[in-house]
Image (spheres, rainbow, N blue to C red):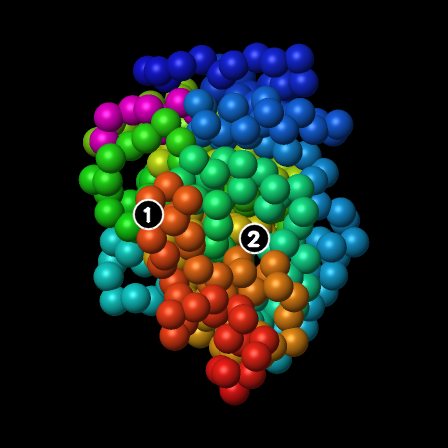
Amino acid sequence: MVEEAPRQTATATRAPQGDRPAVPVYRAPYDWPAIEESVRTLGAAIVPGIVQRSLVDDFNRELDAWLEANPRGTGSDTGSELYDKFLGRKTLRLHGVPGKIEASHPLITHPEIVASMRRLLAHWSNEILLSLAELIQIGPRESAQLIHRDTGSWWPRLPREEHPWNVTAMIALTPFTEETGATRVVPGSCRWPLGERPRFDQIGRAVMEPGDALFFRGDVLHGGGANKTQDQARRGLALSYCAGWLRPVDNNMLAVPPKKAAALGDELLALLGYVAHDATHVDGGLVGMYDNGDPLKALRSGALD
Ligand SMILES: O=C(O)CCC(=O)C(=O)O
Ligand SMILES: [Fe+2]
């Protein structure tokens, strides 16, 4: 049972999906308070056209060139049957994207995406971090990923809260359709008890065009869809952000070490971890310092050379 029906707002439209629950869609001009309310309460919202097509094209072009120069086997081989199935045997996953694909930088720092993430995570922290930038390319004939909560990466039994401490923007880089493996989402499941599994008719699909994004909180049930095509890969970039005191899933400061970081802008560097979380204004403390101070200042002063 879906605990809460998708909230309808003036700007939310529902894609026809038979009897299945729709993930609310908020077209431009974007009603950010409504989008964020949908993410908070239902766990997800689709924001069509948030990323300019030129940025998508730049990213795809650079990624294609990178993959040609750095051939990767598709599919996971972790040694664990269950984990390989979770990651996908026909799915190409690329971590450390900020250190590999420069065209990811304007996506990671996309002003509207980052501003929304800051508001969504503001309950927990003034500073936010990029937890992960992962390319997920679901290849032809891949089976559906297990439905899961991303917050399980940290600790599945952490208390569930009204405000998320982890939110992801999954950016479509190729068409996300029912056939190619559009992300599956269970609206309202961020409020479900742990262990409750969705029925088929409770699972919605994030059908999207390149440049659209699915915003979802880390504790909503979701998973990659099956790719039923013979020849069309589904390519998405998962940009996951978290509260400034939480350890990111990817080690972004190794992906972009000080030598490389020096040439990058302050905002990107702060998202990658060159920032300290400061809770002194609420009688808290500091997390993420370097030599008792701001890591970005240390980088800019040359102290990390
Ligand atoms: O590829 C997708 O659509 C979702 C993937 C996902 O949720 C994950 O790998 O954690
Ligand atoms: Fe996930």
| Quadrant containing the N terminus in the rendered view | top left
Residue 254 position, x and y percent, is: 44, 74
Numbered tag placed on residue 237 in the rendering: 2
Picture quadrant of residue 70 = bottom right
SS under mark 1: loop
Q: Depth check: give the residue in front, 298 or 41.
A: 298
> What is the chief secondary structure element of the magenta stretch?
loop
- The answer to whether residue 149 is seen in the rendering is yes
Task: Confirm whether the magenta stretch covers residue 189.
Answer: yes
Residue 231 position, x and y percent, is: 60, 53
Task: Confirm whether the magenta stretch covers residue 25.
Answer: no
**Residue, x 62% and y 64% (percent of image)?**
266
Which three-letter amino acid code belongs to the residue tagged 2?
Answer: Leu
The answer to whether mark 1 and mark 2 are in CB contact below 8 A is: no
Residue 225 position, x and y percent, is: 47, 41
Numbered tag placed on residue 10 in the rendering: none
Numbered tag placed on residue 284 in the rendering: 1
Rounded to the nearest whole Å, what is the CA distance between mark 1 and mark 2?
34 Å
Asked whether, in this view, residue 291 is left or right of residue 113, the answer is left
SS under mark 2: strand
Give the magenta-colored segment's residue range: 187-194
Which three-letter amino acid code belongs to the residue tagged 1?
Answer: Gly
Mark 2, ligand 1, within 8 Å: the answer is no
Q: Nearer the viewer, mark 1 or mark 2?
A: 1
Residue 239 position, x and y percent, is: 53, 51
Picture quadrant of residue 186 = top left
The 10 Å Cα crowd at callout 2, few under 14, some 14 to 19, many 20 or more, is many
**Residue, x 24% and y 40% (percent of image)?**
158
- The answer to whether residue 93 is seen in the rendering is no
